Image (cartoon, rainbow, N blue to C red):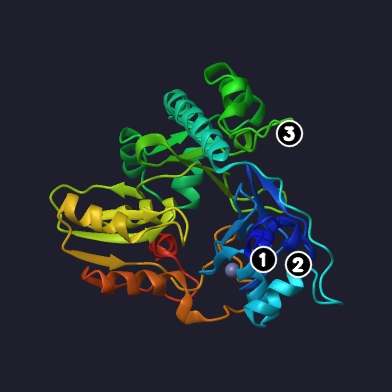
């Protein structure tokens, strides 16, 4: 057995728990840590680092870091690969506490489980989309978007008509009853929308729903700002494409982050397509190349701000960004340049997003 095989047998989550000194949160089959080996500690509610179901690989949602246990060790210890290996395997005295072995599940087993969950999620989201049409006039949802976010009603109605936006009952008890009736408790649990260990699903408390193309993924949002109890928005599933609001024969497109900013860009009268990435590192350059070809987009406007890099809590900047040049907006721009996609850049004023501009208009 090579040292690399031995390293592969170690539990990444156990290593991170011991090294970062934080307990992970379970999210479906993956674990989330509030700290990252590269960009450091987040707020208590941060879920920046994801450890995949294989317990071997992780990915940060705040910085570009991703890797396996050896990459994490090198990032944390800043010594040579050889020294990291010796420390990980406990061959160097006074190193780290002994790391537990990984619960070995075969890759095919994990793939089969993921496929079953993805199929269940799509089935559940189709039903939730249909259910949300019954609650299209849910007053608190409308009030939040129209009064607090200054989104005009015609934009909300158009989003509903395009099946990109849906409302559920704002009373969690009613949401629970309606979802169990329409989707079924078993399917909610099989789809990952309801953690079987919990009495309630987090989506019962998040009545504003944004549906990604193909209904393989959706985002559920609370009404109002984030509280200590509730994370603002939760996304389930993976989508092949970002949100896309098509605008006739336009040859240009704006890129924003977050659905409220997408509706704000439309409300401000932007005449091109609006492409919205659901999280700051939730994109892939192939998606933009595909959209450029499919929609005939010749020019892009990148409207991401550099300040809000944290997926889970865009309103709080935890410490300073280690290397601003490595922000996601920058990485996106570099990828556009490398792939010969023409773009210009729009930067909202500091501490303001596109919705902030829309709201400032109301005051003016
Ligand atoms: Zn990070």
State which tag comes first along the sequence, 2 or 1: 1
Cα–Cα gap, marks 3 and 2: 36 Å
Q: Secondary structure at mark 2?
A: loop
Q: Could you say where residue 281 lies in the image, as x and y percent from the top left?
A: 46, 61
**Callout 1 secondary element:** helix
In the displayed structure, 232 sits above or below 62; it is above
The residue wearing badge 1 is: 3
Relative to residue 4, is residue 92 drawn left or right?
right
The residue under the point 59% across, 51% down is: 52
Q: Secondary structure at mark 3?
A: loop
Q: Residue at x 80, y 72 (%)?
A: 91
Q: Name the image quarter holding the C terminus.
A: bottom left
Q: Position of residue 215 (x, y in %)?
A: 40, 35
Mark 3–mark 2 CB contact (< 8 Å): no
The image quadrant of residue 228 is bottom right
Asked if labels 1 and 2 touch by Cβ distance under 8 angstroms, the answer is yes
Dot 3 crowding, Cα within 10 Å, few <14, some 14–19, many 20+: few
What is the CA distance from the residue labelled 2 to the residue labelled 1? 8 Å
**At x 56% / y 29%, what residue is drawn?**
169
Residue that mark 2 sits on: 89
- Circle nearer the N terminus (3, 1): 1
**Ligand 1 within 8 Å of the CB at mark 1:** no
* The CB of the residue at mark 3 lies under 8 Å from ligand 1: no
Task: State the image quarter where residue 311 is shown.
Answer: bottom right
Of residues 188 and 276, which is closer to you in this image? 188
Where's residue 2, x and y in %? 64, 63
Foreground mark, 3 or 2, reads 2
Q: Is residue 325 visible?
A: yes
* Residue 198 numbered tag: 3
Label drawn at residue 265? none
Quarter of the image where ligand 1 sits: bottom right
């Amino acid at each position: 057995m090579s040292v690399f095989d031995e390293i592969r047998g170690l539990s990444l989550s156990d290593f991170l728990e011991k090294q970062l000194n934080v307990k992970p949160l379970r999210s479906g089959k993956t674990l989330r840590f509030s700290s990252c080996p590269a960009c450091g500690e987040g707020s208590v509610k941060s879920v920046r680092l994801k450890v995949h179901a294989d317990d071997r690989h992780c990915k940060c949602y705040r910085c570009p870091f991703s890797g396996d246990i050896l990459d994490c060790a090198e990032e944390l210890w800043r010594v040579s690969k050889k020294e990291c290996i010796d420390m990980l395997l406990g061959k160097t005295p006074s190193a780290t506490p002994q790391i537990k072995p990984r619960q070995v599940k075969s890759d095919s087993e994990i793939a089969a489980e993921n496929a079953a969950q993805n199929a269940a999620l799509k089935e559940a989201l189709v039903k939730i989309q249909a259910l949300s049409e019954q609650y299209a006039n849910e007053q608190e949802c409308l009030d939040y978007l129209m009064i607090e976010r200054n989104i005009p009603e015609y934009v909300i109605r158009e989003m509903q008509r395009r099946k990109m936006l849906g409302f559920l009952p704002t009373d969690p008890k009613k949401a629970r009853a309606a979802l169990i009736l329409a989707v079924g408790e078993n399917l909610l649990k099989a789809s990952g929308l309801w953690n079987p260990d919990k009495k309630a699903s987090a989506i019962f408390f998040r009545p504003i729903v944004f549906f990604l193309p193909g209904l393989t993924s959706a985002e559920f949002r609370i009404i109002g700002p984030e509280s200590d109890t509730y994370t603002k928005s939760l996304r389930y599933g993976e989508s092949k494409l970002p949100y896309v609001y098509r605008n006739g024969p336009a040859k240009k497109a704006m890129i924003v982050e977050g659905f409220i900013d997408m509706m704000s860009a439309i409300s401000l009268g932007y005449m091109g397509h609006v492409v919205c990435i659901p999280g700051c590192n939730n994109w892939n350059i192939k998606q933009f190349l595909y959209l450029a070809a499919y929609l005939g987009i010749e020019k892009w406007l990148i409207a991401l701000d550099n300040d809000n890099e944290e997926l889970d809590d865009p309103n709080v900047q935890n410490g300073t960004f280690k290397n601003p040049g490595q922000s996601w907006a920058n990485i996106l721009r570099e990828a556009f340049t490398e792939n010969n996609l023409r773009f210009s850049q729009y930067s909202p004023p500091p501490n303001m997003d596109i919705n902030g501009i829309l709201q400032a208009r109301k005051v003016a």
